[in-house]
Image (cartoon, rainbow, N blue to C red):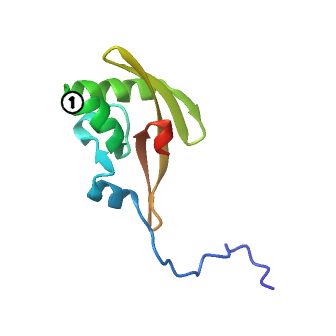
Amino acid sequence: MNNNTNNLFDEAEVIYSYTWDDAINDGTFIRIPEELSKQLFKYPMAITNTIWSRYIEGYDINGRLWDILWMMKNGKKDGSDCYFKVKLGQKWVEMMAVCEARNPKNPEPIITIMLPEDR
């Protein structure tokens, strides 16, 4: 038995991985323009296609994204997750933001904003 502190899977071959960049490329996530997100956050950000199609597409895109980012900035943090509500039109929408590593080979933090049921 090996008594070192290495993870059991450190040397394992990765059979398949689906990364944040893959989700951006296939349209599951929509990248938030850096010129907007960098005003409040320092890491790359995206939102789910669900939020985009329900609450942003067809409206003032920068205005809606700013509202979401501002409410997230002031949301309740719980570890790497942040929970917040944002008023979009006449409706309050509950959202969450998750901060994770970009992918196994690039640990750069990224933030994804989603509906709780998107997780």
- 36, above or below 46, in the image: above
Q: Is residue 3 left or right of residue 113?
A: right
Of the pair 79 and 119, the residue shown nearer to us? 119
Which residue has dot 1 on it? Answer: 61
Residue 35 visible, this orientation: yes
Q: Is residue 103 above or below residue 10?
A: above
**Picture coordinates of residue 110, whole percent (x, y):** 41, 49
What amino acid is at disc 1?
A: Ile
Farthest bottom residue in view: 1
Using residue 110 as the reference point, say whether residue 65 is left or right of it. left
User: What residue sits 38% from the left and 36% below the top?
Assistant: 41
Name the image quarter holding the N terminus: bottom right
Residue 86 picture quarter: top left
**Residue 37 visible in the displayed image:** no
The residue under the point 28% across, 46% down is 31
| Residue 85 sits above or below residue 8 on the image | above
Residue at 60 percent of width and 76 percent of height: 10
- Between residues 34 and 87, which one lies in front from this camera angle? 87
Residue at the outermost top position: 90
Residue 92 placement (x, y as % from top left): 42, 19
Callout 1: SS: helix
List x then y, in percent, for residue 35.
23, 37
Residue at image position (28%, 52%) is 27
Q: Is residue 2 left or right of residue 61?
A: right
How busy is the neighbourhood of tag 1: few (under 14 within 10 Å), some, or many (20 plus)? few
Give x and y (percent) for residue 42.
37, 41
